[in-house]
Amino acid sequence: MKIGYSATIWDDSRSGIGTYIAGQLACLAQRNDVDVRPLEFGGCVLARGESPRTSGAQAGVQNKIRPLKDIWWHRHTLRAVAAREKFDIVHVPTIRRLPGRLPCGSVVTVHDLGPVRLGKKYGMLRGFYHQRIVPKWLRGIDAIVTPSQNTKNDLVDFYQVDLSKITVVPNGVNHTFYHPGDVSESEAIIAKAFNVKPPFFVYVSRLEHPAKNHVRLLEAFARFKEQQRTPHKLVLAGAPWNGHEIIKAAAAPLVARGDVVFADFVPRDLLPHLLRAAEALVYPSLFEGFGIPIIEAMACGTPVACSGTSSLKEIAEGHGLLFDPLDVPAITDALTRIATDSALREKLRREGPAYAKQFTWERSVEETIAVWKKVAAQRAL
């Protein structure tokens, strides 16, 4: 099969969807049973294994021109590209860029329905797009892939998508990077890079308010520090996004005392070290379609405490410490348990890597190809 794979929102793994695209394309380039051609922003069809050089993702939180141009391209120009290239399937790895009618099969990955679940997350324009336009456009798609049962349920509940069109394919982790290692070495690397020494908690997520729930985490951490009188710090690793100024303002007193550190976007080669050096990854996000950072942390042998909601409960239950992300005392209790219960930390450190092993991009690709083959077979009838 010849596959056109939309990579127009390529961001070199700086986001969850970006990590998904990079992880899948890297594995697909090694396959001999499919010929996958990445599609670059602007319409260029790349050779298999080639990485995009441009992106139609937002260049800054206020810039909407490139995304709108990219949506238009998927709706009106992609059809001609698919016909010219004689694609058997076009795969679009995001609900944000739903294609128009194509001369070949169409498969879309829907990671989550965050704009529907969290109405204030993206503003009125994107809310209208996801609530009124997306449901209509999804009807023309042959098959949908989701990373979690939670997202599958949302597609049925909110968009009334036919269950037979949806296949759950869990996301993967790059185990070449994320694996247990020398903790002392990682601690030394992180101390040099960010001037942070253990013990510390880490939250890996872009600075987005209110969806990522940083403010409640900061309140919970302040209570934890007051109650426990420990030297723990909180490292917030992520680039500024919508509402970042609110997070910075809430953190200001803790930053002044040296208890909170903003690490900004952490390069891929440093992130595994940051996870290994941390006492735990704390992930209080209000809503996720999967939650790749929690599996990356588990793969490194880092204990995880996360929200017991949306897909996070589905992915982490029984393998991490869950809490109600809306309950500040509950988050404080989770921080306290992780910090004071060495037996719990050791259990999570020991069991995490084995559990995370099942989440690979090879598996993700294998199961996605099965969806492509099913669509191709149905269209051949």
Image: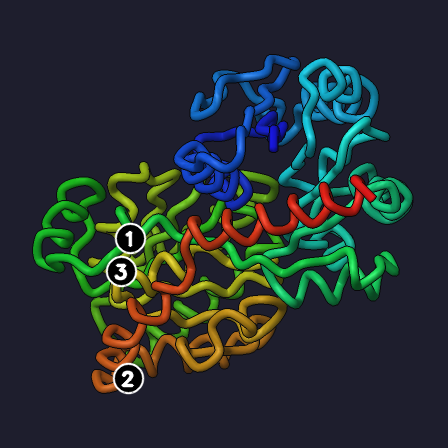
| 344 relative to 7, above or below | below
Q: Is residue 58 visible?
A: no
SS category of the residue bearing label 2:
helix
Q: Are marks 3 and 1 in contact (CB under 8 Å)?
A: yes
Position of the C terminus, as image quadrant, is: top right
In this rendering, position of residue 367 left or right of residue 318:
right
Residue 374 place in picture, x, y as percent: 69, 49
Q: Nearer the viewer, residue 135 or 374?
A: 374
Going by the numbered disc 3, the residue's amino acid type is Cys
In this rendering, position of residue 13 left or right of residue 269:
right
Name the residue carrying label 2.
Answer: 344
Residue at left offset 88%, top offset 46%: 139
Going by the numbered disc 2, the residue's amino acid type is Leu
In this rendering, position of residue 3 left or right of residue 254:
right
Tell me if mark 3 has few (under 14), some (14-19) or many (20+) residues whose alpha carbon lies within 10 angstroms of its own: many
Q: Nearer the viewer, residue 332 or 378?
A: 378
SS category of the residue bearing label 3:
loop
Q: Nearer the viewer, residue 36 or 130?
A: 36
Residue at left offset 42%, top offset 49%: 362
In this rendering, position of residue 100 left or right of residue 4:
right
Going by the numbered disc 1, the residue's amino acid type is Tyr
Q: Is residue 231 visible?
A: yes
Name the residue carrying label 3.
Answer: 300
Mark 2 or mark 3: name the one nearer the start of the chain.
3
Where, by quadrant of the figure, is residue 376 drawn? Answer: top right
Calculate the distance from the C-alpha at mark 1 to the C-alpha at mark 2: 21 Å
Residue 74 place in picture, x, y as percent: 75, 25
Name the residue carrying label 1.
Answer: 178
Calculate the distance from the C-alpha at mark 3 to the C-alpha at mark 1: 5 Å
